[in-house]
Image: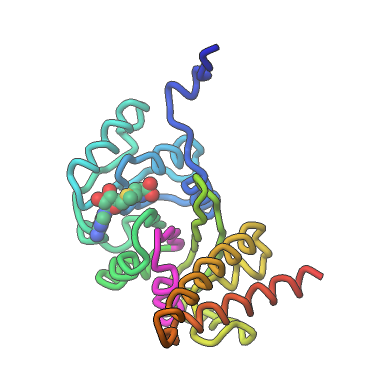
């Protein structure tokens, strides 16, 4: 028998866990900037759930931005949107948005976007970020540039783990990584560990498996790279810390 799709699902795509998790980290804000909005689903859902008043949706690609425009119109929300074709915060001025999301981009790109117009990023009350890779580089940038980590979460979406970070520029409140953390190692989040995020442990275990396999292969070819040895050692240490806390 052919499976039937519920009516509501046919009308609107269900928000993916990755974006749902970002919505939860966002909370209630005023004007939301969705940088790299692409399909525009995040802004639409934030409006539907009354998490923001209006959305400035921007993307470096005009065809991507157009997808957001079409979705907003389809949902009758076009009057609550402003659309801008620009890279990062290039088309923004200070304080016109209260909060921003940068989702589904590389961690280094997110850090570059924050840095290149830092006078705009630094005025936002909350920035929610979801790097596709380069989590350590992004976290290192945040820790070294006066950002206070407000919250962190891990989500599992279509078999892949993602890390999410909410932060704001508050040099006076910014804390260093806890002393029990491997020094200068930003691969996983202290806040996620502190709040015992239930997906942190399986994500670290998967990461450890990947790093150990890489190390084994490298060892067969000769001297294993120091960076890989460090990744394995540090991940084991964090797993141990997580398990000690659990007892
Ligand atoms: C993988 S999509 C993510 C879409 C959506 N944010 C999400 O998480 O589902 C990345 C989007 O970022 C846009 N993008 C890439 N570099 C950008 C930049 N420097 N500034 C703004 N948008 C950018 C791309 O055009 C693309 O639409």
Q: Residue at x 53, y 51 (%)?
A: 27
Q: Position of residue 137 (x, y in %)?
A: 39, 74
* Quadrant into which the C terminus falls: bottom right
The picture quadrant where one finds residue 129 is bottom left
* Quadrant into which the N terminus falls: top right
Residue 58 in sight: no
Q: Residue at x 56, y 58 (%)?
A: 154
Q: Position of residue 16 (x, y in %)?
A: 48, 41
Q: Is residue 141 magenta?
A: yes
Q: Residue at x 31, y 54 (%)?
A: 35
In-front residue for pair 227/16: 227
Q: Residue at x 60, y 69 (%)?
A: 191
In-front residue for pair 198/8: 198
Q: Residue furthest top?
A: 1
**In the picture shown, does residue 108 fall above or below 13?**
below
The picture quadrant where one finds residue 193 is bottom right
Residue 41 in sight: yes
In-front residue for pair 193/204: 204
Is 107 positioned to the left or the right of 152 in the image? left
In-front residue for pair 182/82: 182
Which region of the structure is painted magenta? 125-145
Q: Position of residue 142 (x, y in %)?
A: 43, 75
Q: Position of residue 230 (x, y in %)?
A: 51, 83
**In the picture shown, does residue 154 fall above or below 245?**
above
């Amino acid at each position: 028998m052919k499976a039937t799709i519920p009516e509501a699902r046919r009308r609107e795509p269900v928000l993916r866990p990755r974006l749902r998790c970002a919505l939860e980290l966002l909370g209630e804000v005023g004007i939301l900037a969705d940088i790299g909005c692409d399909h525009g689903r995040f802004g639409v859902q934030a409006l539907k759930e009354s998490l923001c008043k209006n959305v400035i949706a921007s993307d470096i690609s005009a065809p991507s931005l157009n997808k957001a425009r079409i979705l907003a119109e389809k949902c009758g929300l076009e009057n609550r949107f402003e659309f801008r074709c620009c890279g990062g915060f290039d088309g923004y001025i200070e304080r016109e948005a209260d909060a921003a999301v940068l989702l589904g981009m590389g961690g280094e790109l997110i850090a570059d976007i924050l840095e290149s117009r830092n006078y705009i990023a630094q005025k936002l009350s909350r920035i929610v970020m979801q790097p596709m890779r380069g989590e350590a580089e992004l976290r290192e940038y945040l820790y070294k540039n006066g950002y206070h980590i407000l919250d962190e979460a891990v989500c599992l979406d279509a078999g892949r783990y993602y890390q999410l970070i909410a932060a704001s520029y508050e040099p006076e409140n910014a804390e260093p990584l806890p002393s029990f953390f491997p020094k200068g190692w930003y691969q996983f989040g202290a806040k996620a560990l502190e709040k015992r995020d239930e997906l942190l442990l399986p994500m670290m275990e998967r990461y450890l498996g990947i790093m150990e396999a890489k190390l084994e292969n490298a060892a067969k070819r000769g001297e294993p790279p120091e960076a890989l040895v460090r990744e394995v050692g540090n991940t084991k240490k964090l797993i141990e810390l997580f398990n000690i806390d659990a007892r």
